[in-house]
Image (tube, rainbow, N blue to C red):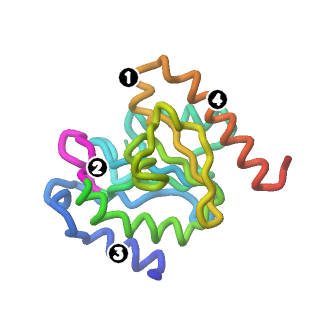
Amino acid sequence: MRTWEELERDCGRCMRCGLCRTRHNVVFGVGPRDADVMFVGEGPGEQEDLRGEPFVGPAGMLLDDMLSIIDLGRHNCYIANIVKCRPPHNRDPQEQEQEACIDYLRDQMALVKPKIIVCLGRIAAMKLIKPDFRITREHGAWTEKGGVWFTAMYHPSALLRDVSKRPETFEDLLSLREKLRELQGKL
Ligand code: URA
């Protein structure tokens, strides 16, 4: 497996799919490389593309608020996306773009070795949990795979569009806090 340095270098010059033609920056991922919790979104938006960092636009501000509800600062979590370059006009990343990019995320997951991976939204959940994942029905559910616990929440962008989903996300956040305490041996 690649080292962090090799991975970041390969990712930074990647031309495996057409998204490389329109990106300003590759959005590799941020956070402690030994974090217990990893959040995975779908792909960079405009602000993320310009700054080279995930979740720094409006959705990212809401993600910060969500994390603060359970006393989990973003500086404690590793944050990445399924695709590392911005899909034009924030469209969903296409299957072939996701496939071209997923190795980078898999290496990040293997290097960080988180206890928990939280998929933000349908696209990440379908890629990492199961292809037929239904976010409206299955958000907040837990699945263990290879020693890592996976769950999914509504994407913060969906929560910005539809505030009626927020109470359910509050429950999912409490469940995340509980799972983390359990896995950290604090319960
Ligand atoms: N939406 C995502 O899925 N990822 C980001 O980094 C920003 C917005």
Q: Which residue is mark 3?
A: 9
Going from the N terminus, do you reach mark 3 or mark 1 first?
A: 3
Query: Who is closer to the viewer here, 135 or 111?
Result: 135
Amino acid type indicated by mark 1: Arg
Q: Name the N-terminal-most of marks 4 and 1.
A: 1
Residue at 15% across, 60% down: 18
Would you call the spot at circle 1 few (<14 residues within 10 Å), some (14-19), or many (20 or more)?
A: few
Residues drawn in magenta: 85-94
Q: Residues within 10 Å of mark 2 (few under 14, many from 20)?
A: many
Mark 2 residue CB less than 8 A from any atom of ligand 1: no
CA gap between label 2 and label 3 equals 17 Å
Mark 3 Cα-neighbour bin, 10 Å: few <14, some 14–19, many ≥20? few
User: Distance between the Cα atoms at labels 3 and 1?
Assistant: 36 Å
How far apart are labels 2 and 1 at the CA level? 21 Å
Determine which residue is flagged by label 4.
Answer: 171
| Vertical comparison of 169 with 187: above or below | above
Type of the residue with mark 3? Arg
Q: Position of residue 2 (x, y in %)?
A: 44, 81
Q: Nearer the viewer, mark 2 or mark 1?
A: 1
Residue picked out by circle 1: 161
Q: Residue at x 22, y 54 (%)?
A: 24
Classify residue 67 as left or right of residue 52: right
Q: Is residue 4 left or right of residue 69?
A: left
Judge depth for marks 4 and 2 and give the one in front. 4
Indicate which label's residue lies in the foreground, 4 or 1. 4
